Image: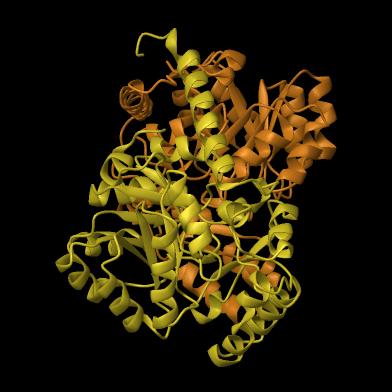
Chain colours: A yellow, B orange
Amino acid sequence: MIKTRLTEMLGLKYPIFQGGMAWVATPALVSAVSEAGALGILGTGHLNAAETLKAIQETRERTSKLFGVNIMLQSPRVSEIVKVCLEEKVPMVTFGAGNPAIYIPAFKEMGIMVFPVVNNVALAVRLKRTGVEGIIAEGREAGGHVGKNATLPLIPQIVDATNLPVVAAGGFADGRGLLAALSLGAVGVQMGTRFICTQEAEVHPNYQGAIVKAGDLSTIISGETIGHPVRVIRNQLANKILELEKKGASLEELEALGVGALKKAVYNGDTIEGSLMAGEISGLIKDIPSVLQVLSRIEEEFYTVFNSLRFQLENQDRI
Amino acid sequence: MIKTRLTEMLGLKYPIFQGGMAWVATPALVSAVSEAGALGILGTGHLNAAETLKAIQETRERTSKLFGVNIMLQSPRVSEIVKVCLEEKVPMVTFGAGNPAIYIPAFKEMGIMVFPVVNNVALAVRLKRTGVEGIIAEGREAGGHVGKNATLPLIPQIVDATNLPVVAAGGFADGRGLLAALSLGAVGVQMGTRFICTQEAEVHPNYQGAIVKAGDLSTIISGETIGHPVRVIRNQLANKILELEKKGASLEELEALGVGALKKAVYNGDTIEGSLMAGEISGLIKDIPSVLQVLSRIEEEFYTVFNSLRFQLENQDRI
């Protein structure tokens, strides 16, 4: 148990969101995370309306705890996914990779909580006006679709500009990171890559293996030149995309390469031609524990670091 | 006063280094920072041997406290600057923008402390073997010359890999950031941009004004394509460089544009054709206080945030 404004607000044991990753955040993972006391969030980036409905129903069968649904704004099926979430009255939604302002009023009317994923101050301020419950401020360290700002400078700026509950994302995998996020003014963290590397994640072991083997310099950003920057572990596909970008390849050419590439990695375990989306924090991830073990370790480390800082500072007159 | 392993080791009041920025970190700023209880570090990237000697002497006249000298490894005069620092037996040196391994033994022999600036784990591990006293682990958020990794994922990886005192750099300007750095396992922070915006910094008000006006998306990285990535506030010069890089311009063409550009910004206040080196944290910097005010504010904020976290966590059994 780590109490923050976020755990009070959502009735959680840990101030931790599991990122709603396409292909990865399935009912099995989401329900395991929610059951363990954090917040599981369904990924729908790879689903149609019927599949989304099925995933929501399956999650509800597996847990009675709070969970969320991520709506990926670059999906061609955004409006039908939105419709399913409204009809099902899911407890909360997150939005990634875009500006969700036009969709928010419908969710507010239904009493569904909204936490958009945001990478800059202007969008956070704009979305505050729509009545969102909180902001997931995600830095460029994150895996998958990313913005310009790094997490460390981004968090305090969004906290200052919005005064909303801010969940920090991008670069988090352990208890030290969680304490750092709270120090910056966040109320919790969202983690993606750390949850890919859990027993409950229904992903191919090759994909997990690529993350476990990764070092601090293993990830790169592809797609920057066409306005769709995505962080992945460097492999043959990533090198091919970067090479084509250098030659000024068009959006269409690059998108053709990207179609199905995430599925290839997650589902087929193709580490050569698959898109190995993963965060810069991959270098810190060295094993595949259970979700419960991940959360217990974070709790243990969080309090160890906090108590050691407290001990170190205690002999001074300010504590 | 904020006690850490770093303040104990160096006899400081604050676990804070002022980055050794070329043109900016002059004896006036360096001595003000050291006098106030943090560590001032001379910038020598723009100096020759005689000027470096003069700057060291002037700093010694202004303060009897500990100070450092930054040796910029991309300077054409590295070996003569190294020689001056050895002859003068300065208390400590930092090295930026490269691999200083070949220079370190001479400093060790003289009993001069060495803190290299590093952006990746492999270099940190290699430099540990040379006997350095600590590592300044600097993320891509920093101003000026940068590497690939962001600060937040970088720090714990370098702490784990080296077990040396790690000073976190890139993205720091306030007490929240300092507490975040200590949470990640660092023993202190280095700040550059925050010290540019102080009364004691001998820089043109236009340069300071550009930082104060900057928002979260104002800085960009230029020079990536030629292997010399530098973070600056976007202006006409930066746009011109990015445009030329897109067209595949050579190192020589781009270097011609860069010559004297930092001096133009810092010294002449040319915010159009000057190189406005500054970190991503510029968006958080809103004024030009004195060095002492910067440090007092950081101390105040650090303890406010720490005590508020402590209060929030105290009702739980782990604290």
Most distant residue in the left direction = A109
- Location of residue A56 (image quadrant): bottom left
For the residue pair B201 and A292, the one nearer the viewer reads as: A292
Question: Is residue B107 at least partly visible in the picture?
Answer: yes
Q: Is residue B11 left or right of residue B304?
A: right
Q: Compare residues B74 and B214 and report the one nearer the observer.
A: B214
In this rendering, does residue B119 appear at all?
no
Q: Is residue A256 left or right of residue B38?
A: right
Residue B299 falls left or right of residue B38: left
Q: Say which of A229 and B246 sits in front.
A: A229
Q: How many marks?
A: 0
In the image, what residue occupies the spot 23% across and 70% down?
A: A104
Farthest residue to the front: give it.
A61
Q: Which quadrant is the C terminus of chain B positioned in?
A: top left
Q: Position of residue B309 (x, y in %)?
A: 35, 28
Residue plotted at (69% across, 64% down): A207
Above/below status of B140 relative to A61? above
Q: Write the residue at 53% across / 56% down.
A: A192
Q: Identify the residue at horizontal 33%, vertical 41% (top origin).
A: A7
Q: Quadrant of the N terminus of chain B?
A: top left
| Closer to us: A145 or A109 | A109
Percent position (x, y) of residue B93?
Answer: 67, 29
Q: Position of residue A68 (x, y in %)?
A: 37, 60
For residue B197, side relative to residue A218 (left or right): left
Which image quarter: residue A241?
Answer: bottom right
Place of residue A226 in the rendered image (x, y in percent of width and height, measured from the top left): 52, 81
